[in-house]
Image (cartoon, grey):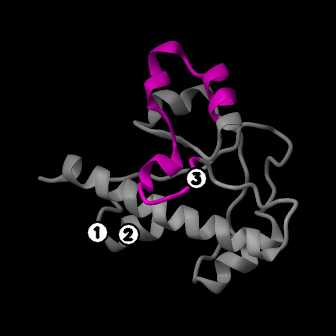
Amino acid sequence: MLRLVDEAGLAGRVEVDSAGTGDWHIGEAPDERAQRAGGQRGYDLAPLRARQIAAGDFRRFDLIVAMDDANVTALQGVCPASERDKIRLLMEFAPQAQVRVVVDPYFGGDAGFEMVLDQCEAACAGLLAVLRPQLAD
């Protein structure tokens, strides 16, 4: 998403961040397989560090995007009721997709990480297309 926002010339208008719902990887870099797959597509994931979503994120951001239903449920559990309409599934923005959630590649092989990148790239392009009219001057 960061690359798409930058390529669209919207870097100063769209803020992109990432956080997990659990606390078990705080401060860690992405999985080596994710870094390898991302690197093959020109994404440098090495500087990224995991953080857990915080209550302030629901006030700070206009949209909170989850990868799957378990994350939606976890987000709803920590989200103020007045902010719950901000939570959406990423794959909602990939209308051609045959699945409604991003697959979990953790227990699979390298092909699973490639599939996640395919899903995320398609959905992020769709998300940017939805955001564009809202950002028009």
For label 3, the SS is loop
Residue at the top extreme? Answer: 81
Which residue is at 45% across, 71% downward? 3
Q: Amino acid at mark 3?
A: Val
Relative to 110, is 102 above or below? above
Q: Is residue 1 visible?
A: no
**N-terminal-most mark, 1 or 3:** 1
Residue under numbered circle 2: 6
- Separation of marks 1 and 3 at Cα, in angstroms: 30 Å
The label nearer to you, 1 versus 3, is: 3
Q: Amino acid at mark 1?
A: Gly
| Percent position of residue 21, x then y | 71, 37
Q: Quadrant of residue 7?
A: bottom left
For label 2, the SS is helix
Residue range in magenta is 72-100
Q: Are discs 1 and 2 less than 8 Å apart at CB?
A: yes
| Percent position of residue 127, x then y | 39, 54
Residue under numbered circle 1: 9
Which residue is at 30% across, 58% downward? 129
| Percent position of residue 10, x then y | 30, 62
Relative to 88, is 48 above or below? below
Q: Nearer the viewer, residue 46 or 31?
A: 31
Residue under numbered circle 3: 99
- Separation of marks 1 and 2 at Cα, in angstroms: 5 Å
| Percent position of residue 39, x then y | 66, 82
For label 1, the SS is loop
Residue at the left extreme? Answer: 137
Which residue is at 55% across, 28% downward? 56
The label nearer to you, 2 versus 3, is: 3
